[in-house]
Amino acid sequence: MKLEDINIRDPFVLNDGGVYYLYGTRAKDFGCHTGGFDVYTSTDLVNWSEASLVKINNDNAGCTWAPEACYDPEECFNSAEYGLNREVNWAPEVHKYKGEYYMLATFTQENRLRGSYVLKAENPLGMFEPYSDGALTPEEWECLDATLYVSKSGEPYLVFCHEHTQIIDGEICFIKLNKELNAAISLPTRLFAASSPYWADKKPKGEHYITDGPFMYRTKEGKLLLIWSTFVNHKYCQCVARSSDNELNGVFEHLPLLIDNDGGHGMIFKAEDKLYLSYHTPNTNGLEHPKFTLIKDNGKSIELV
């Protein structure tokens, strides 16, 4: 199976010992009522295994988006059992942290607002189980697309989107996590709003600005980048911002768009001596598929090759 044959959104790649694990939102109906996640494996980034079902809810569940880990619903993750069988299951990421595997994913909370949770497993194929005590994002906020960032001093943070659906002008924020990654230990801090880049559309008051899919990357010169997605001129775009102090407390400078032609929700991964941007394109339901584009780390930022 080739990438063009894989109909997913939000593709996330974990390179673990030379085996590449590809996870993503089942794209049909934007991931709604799909009943689970798929995982694909490869050793060459070209040929991919057939999907293995990663079912995390029953057939009556709502949306299931952006998985990055395997589940067997009967044995390891039944969303009804854990109180998560309400609506969305979105934007998971799997990070290897201190030898174990942590999945970050967005679920609908009991109050009907979305929040980002942490799940845990001993290997990238699962079995994953809920690990955090509910959402780590503020309970009263509408949030999604959390990613893990570990600072140069080893402090873990959750970087996430505060949804435009609640605040009109979407934001990217962060909170500090405990060392175990199962609790937030700070109040949220805003990094920037979706309307802040110099290239952002100028919209009438009340129209929405979207933040989507944050991911952190440190360049070979130690610059801290935040890649994220939004819409510019009605097209889904891949954006880059750079911290002034190379940590989350810096002021983020918005750089020129990396992709402006209907591709986004990206992440960066290494394969041997090469660096790739993984993202989905087009942003048209039913046609989405992963795309891996070679990028160059020039020390100050990243650029397409």
Image (spheres, rainbow, N blue to C red):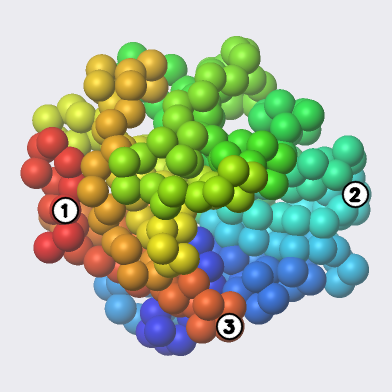
What residue is at 87 percent from the left and 53 percent from the top? Answer: 86
Q: Secondary structure at mark 2?
A: loop
Could you tell me which secondary element the residue under label 1 belongs to? strand
**Are circles 1 and 2 on residues that touch, CB within 8 Å?**
no
Query: Which residue carries the number 3 mark?
Result: 286
> Residue sitting at 24 percent across and 42 percent down?
255
Q: Are marks 3 and 1 in contact (CB under 8 Å)?
A: no
Residue drawn at the location 39% of the way across and 79% of the way down? 3
Which is nearer the eye, 301 or 158? Answer: 301
Percent x, y for residue 156? 47, 23
> Can you give x and y, in whole percent of width and height, for residue 33 in the image?
79, 71
Seen in the picture, residue 263 relative to 202 is either above or below; the reply is: below
User: Which residue in the protein does label 2 denote?
Assistant: 81
The alpha-carbon separation of the residues under discs 3 and 1 comes to: 29 Å
Q: Decide which of tag 1 and tag 2 comes sooner along the chain.
A: 2
Camera sees residue 145:
no
Q: Amino acid at mark 1?
A: Glu
- Viewer-proximal residue among 267 and 43: 267
Which amino acid, by three-letter code, is at mark 2?
Glu
Q: Residues within 10 Å of mark 1 (few under 14, many from 20)?
A: some
The residue sitting at 74% across, 43% down in the picture is: 114
Residue ID for mark 1: 303
Left or right, 272 with respect to 146, comes to left
Q: Position of residue 127 (x, y in %)?
A: 66, 52
SS for tag 3?
loop
As drawn, 156 above or below 38: above
